[in-house]
Amino acid sequence: MKIGMIGYAFMGAAHSNAWRTAGRFFDLPATPELAVVCGRSADKVAAAAAKYGWESSETDWRAVIDRPDVEVIDICTPGDSHAEIAIAALAAGKHVLCEKPLANTVEEASRMVSAAASASGRSMVMFNYRRVPALALARQLIAAGRIGTVRQVRAQYLQDWLVDPDFPLTWRLDAASAGSGALGDLGAHSIDMAQFLTGQRISAVGGMLETFVDSRPKLDGSGRGPVTVDDAALFTARFDGGAIGVFEATRFATGRKNAMRIEVSGSLGTLSYDQESMNELRFYDGAEDPLTAGFRRILVTEPTHPYMDAWWPPGHIIGYEHTFVHQVRDFVTGVVEGTELSPSFEEGLQVQRVLDAVQQGISLRGV
Amino acid sequence: MKIGMIGYAFMGAAHSNAWRTAGRFFDLPATPELAVVCGRSADKVAAAAAKYGWESSETDWRAVIDRPDVEVIDICTPGDSHAEIAIAALAAGKHVLCEKPLANTVEEASRMVSAAASASGRSMVMFNYRRVPALALARQLIAAGRIGTVRQVRAQYLQDWLVDPDFPLTWRLDAASAGSGALGDLGAHSIDMAQFLTGQRISAVGGMLETFVDSRPKLDGSGRGPVTVDDAALFTARFDGGAIGVFEATRFATGRKNAMRIEVSGSLGTLSYDQESMNELRFYDGAEDPLTAGFRRILVTEPTHPYMDAWWPPGHIIGYEHTFVHQVRDFVTGVVEGTELSPSFEEGLQVQRVLDAVQQGISLRGV
Amino acid sequence: MKIGMIGYAFMGAAHSNAWRTAGRFFDLPATPELAVVCGRSADKVAAAAAKYGWESSETDWRAVIDRPDVEVIDICTPGDSHAEIAIAALAAGKHVLCEKPLANTVEEASRMVSAAASASGRSMVMFNYRRVPALALARQLIAAGRIGTVRQVRAQYLQDWLVDPDFPLTWRLDAASAGSGALGDLGAHSIDMAQFLTGQRISAVGGMLETFVDSRPKLDGSGRGPVTVDDAALFTARFDGGAIGVFEATRFATGRKNAMRIEVSGSLGTLSYDQESMNELRFYDGAEDPLTAGFRRILVTEPTHPYMDAWWPPGHIIGYEHTFVHQVRDFVTGVVEGTELSPSFEEGLQVQRVLDAVQQGISLRGV
Amino acid sequence: MKIGMIGYAFMGAAHSNAWRTAGRFFDLPATPELAVVCGRSADKVAAAAAKYGWESSETDWRAVIDRPDVEVIDICTPGDSHAEIAIAALAAGKHVLCEKPLANTVEEASRMVSAAASASGRSMVMFNYRRVPALALARQLIAAGRIGTVRQVRAQYLQDWLVDPDFPLTWRLDAASAGSGALGDLGAHSIDMAQFLTGQRISAVGGMLETFVDSRPKLDGSGRGPVTVDDAALFTARFDGGAIGVFEATRFATGRKNAMRIEVSGSLGTLSYDQESMNELRFYDGAEDPLTAGFRRILVTEPTHPYMDAWWPPGHIIGYEHTFVHQVRDFVTGVVEGTELSPSFEEGLQVQRVLDAVQQGISLRGV
């Protein structure tokens, strides 16, 4: 199964490793081949190809799609190019794996869903945290009724890399490229995860955005330019199954490095997770005698835990890039065996709708 | 200094212990005398007086206020009676210590503030968590600039005692007595704490309330009656100093017993706290070299920590009721020495205004 | 029940509080009266009496024992005087509560056991940590077979107050007064706790002592004097029921303030405890499916937990001095109702024998 | 740089991944080629070669050594074959990377040291935990004096995979193959780590071994056979620089899966680590004001942390197999650039001497 990857920055390194490694630990029904990687600078992308193990490189993504031997297009570019690339790839009969968020607007995402619906190729959006074993286990436990009726979600995605007011104005701080800031980059993960874990969809939101530092040094050294995305986004939500939730996404939580945290409470129990300790899941089982009930730290390294039979003995933990390896495993298996690929573009569109509603904001009430 | 206490339930036990104990560990400028405790049932209040060490008991709170030897009225009743008792006590020249929230409505709270302003006696509302050494230390560190400009507050007050749908319909679930549910009982603490720690006031809010179980068994056994308060309250907020915050108060967080949590992030650091581990404060100091920076677990038991020189050697922790002992220490000291008593009724009114704005709600935006 | 307390320093404050408070929260079959406190300096002991609520003070402990109205002698002095006072008190028909370790030598402790055996009064040695609710719960769970056959004990008692080489030469650093250093002060608690939890007795030990700082400033300012006790003690042990254990007691564990930690592993589970978080017990239940098994953090604040029905609602924690309150409750109840008082002097002697064997040391093997 | 790997079980998977991956993330001065893997079963080793990406397979390790193109011999076999293979490989001019413990006896290890001393090839023993970034950071901090004079080590290596008495009799439970049990498998890591971190060598020990379950089902189904190694090992130690330490290695700590824990206390601070949370290092800096001092949780994912600039942004953690990747990086770099390779065979021999002294045991003293 020949892969063409568009984009090769931070996500490119993680994706390359996943394509290279998945078959070394999992039994895959097809062997991914790292056929071609694509980037704008010929030199840089050639260097990336050598470093990451791609057979060739390209500077025009259309040329990658035009290659008849390439079966899969893996999109790792900024959000503003997702729709164009994905729609072209689907039109060419390729399978598409697209980084999150699906697009920068609901309109783009809707077109991608339409394209996917009528395509011969399969498609999937990458919310890699669904492939964290601890979170896949949480989903299993909720689906099995272990926490009863889901009542409340508390989700935080806390980072701090913008605390320094002189951190430069990268594409992630430009609305035209990134769509939004913490909301789309971080909040999108929380939204997808909340919906994935609870099996409920967010039906209404009320939120607000804040940009604490409104100008930053431009990358070309020509002074400061405006930050056009949010630094932090806060919102409350109702789910269609009766749950309620509270969400925070921020790049200003000093000292929190990658704290994608989510806690789901139900009538019978609670599950709690923090990405900074990604091999652990906290579980309170309300069915236990209060004499010995308590939040358990499940070290998610047992062979019966999702994905973990492929790795090491109990107690030996895995890391961030393993989520991408698991994603490749599920994608390749789904494509070859014709089973469901999730999250679908339709699920990605739903996340986009929530992001859009949050961005439109609400009127706060004065005290 | 003779004390008269109105009400003697859960809070009565904690207050009695505080009046008895404060002078045994702190050097007080006056010795509290447990003169009289007041309750509706003559038998029960007499038993409480014996148990808790009060010299006498009464069934009419007006009789307590009428006693010329009683200097201080300590109000531990449900919120709907606070205004009447406090205003009468102030009119009689007594000092007043009133449980939180100050009242059930903004109107009542406003009248209390007016009464306090023109009274000869001193007054104070009891947000006892201000007297947790770890939180008093957090306030010191923020005031000293250790976390820089305050940017974000994340506050949760999580309990789970209503998860059982057959938990009975106590006065706390009746709007007429309690005003509101989780919002006023728990959220009030979070609001006061957020304002205390940041030194900023909440200026606007957007929130929502939810009642998951809308009827419960009546205490008299005559079937089920309606729950007229919220089980959970979620809201986002803006502060007048530029910070933003997200709040959750709930009695449905299965497994969370008394998790009054608050985290404050600033441009230079973050402080984090959980009442279930009340002797600990987490502090991330952004001024440190990233090589060794990390959230510190400060065990707040050193003699230089607030209130702790009165207790045990380092590492020997204190418990919940100590917050009331500290409150008595500060109240007695403030009354005798004429120094500021905080939180004032005016601060209590501000909390009431926030609660009121949250209760009025917002229109969520559909997804 | 009139109490006479000999000694009034750190332990005196804790004991006084316990005698005053136990009846306010627990239903006791007799009411302790703080009759007389005894110390060497007339002025200081009078001040302590006023501060802590004792009716009178004395400078001669024999005078306290001579008082016919005093029923209970509470011994809080350094270890070298325990035997003389306790034996005299027992001879006078008093009940005796004696601080740990029971004595400074096996010989003294043996005489105390003999005196107790033939006395009309009851006796008990104070290992107050047995009255931590979390540890009492641990004992219950082990006795109920929840961790199966007990296999291993890992016990640490870590403090750091001697790290500063200029910390002064108090009586605790003088072998004549204190018997030993970290070993008897801290290790004695670990030994008693290990035996209490497992229900097994230590039958053999191999250990070593170390004094890192061998001279310190004398209290009278006359230069430095020799430290004649250990700063740290390490030993391994065999128990008579087949378990094995490893112990560390130290005053040099920088940053550890009062970390009395103990972990007991059995064939079916493990229990783990740290005094710095004394309201928590960790429990791994090996009977659970590995899918959801994990160390639970039991917040030991439920009404069904030992001692906790007397205190606050779930999630509201207690502190260090509560262990003494519980001890008074158990002592008074045991004396009045004639039930077993534990730990007995005989149990205290067994601890002394272990301490003695550790102090005699072993020959290490060179590498 | 062509690699030949002898053995391909658990360690083989980890080593293969390391050889494949190191050059994808680190800039190596030579590119490892996975030339040949060797095992006893031709079919199984061929399958392993395909799975793990080796170019060829062999069943005779001597044939691997005989290949002139193979530069490096990577030894992953049980301990009883280490000496023979390593000495032959060194005699053939190969570089040798040998799994821990270096050998099963001091005699074997001594011969390996002699062979290494006179060889043209370089050699290194694999104590992979030295390549955990958090532990490499701990070493840096201790070497820089951040905890002052090292005083105490407390080391535990806790697993629980033998708790089930019907767990089968694998080679690890056979003294002839494995040398010892928990002691050599787990304790060897703790000993190496303690010496690595402190910069001191263990000079004397006193310890004891225990086998809780003395027979287990044989792998061939022919009933039960004797367990000839220890299930648990406990010992105390003196270091040549004045520190003391206490060690526990066990396979019976129910619920502890891979808890290689080590805590080092010095006159100015303490460092604490647990392999189950391998991206975290706890640091207490005694130079701080006690007002804000506390154990910091350093999330060891910053680009300035050892090895971490090759991986992901801050807060994105790594896993167990990364330690082997780091080892390959250091080995290849050291071989090509001629710099020191550590731990050396001589360091491996020192560990073996400590293991030997522990195994000889001490006489405990009866209580």
Image (cartoon, coloured by chain):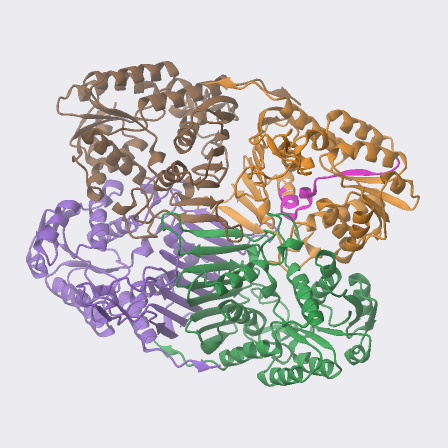
Chain colours: A orange, B brown, C purple, D green
In front of the other: A35 or B187: A35
Residue displayed at 29% across by 15% down: B114
Residue A365, horizontal then vertical, whole percent: 51, 18
In the displayed structure image, the side of residue A290 where residue A304 appears, left or right? right
Q: Quarter of the image containing the C terminus of chain B?
A: top right
Residue B98, horizontal then vertical, whole percent: 29, 25
- The answer to which image quadrant residue D176 occupies is bottom right
- The answer to which image quadrant residue A72 occupies is top right
Q: Tell me which segment is drawn in magenta.
A: A120-138
Q: Is residue B36 visible?
A: no
User: Residue A127: within the magenta?
Assistant: yes
User: Residue C245: within the magenta?
Assistant: no
Task: Tell me: residue C87, above or below residue A31.
Answer: below
In front of the other: C18 or B316: B316
Q: Quarter of the image containing the N terminus of chain B?
A: top left
Residue displayed at 35% across by 38% down: B136
Residue B147, horizontal then vertical, whole percent: 45, 39
In front of the other: D302 or C180: D302
In the displayed structure image, the side of residue A40 where residue C199 appears, left or right? left
Residue displayed at 35% across by 56% down: C258
Task: Tell me: residue A265, above or below residue C123.
Answer: above
Task: Tell me: residue A18, above or below residue B12.
Answer: below
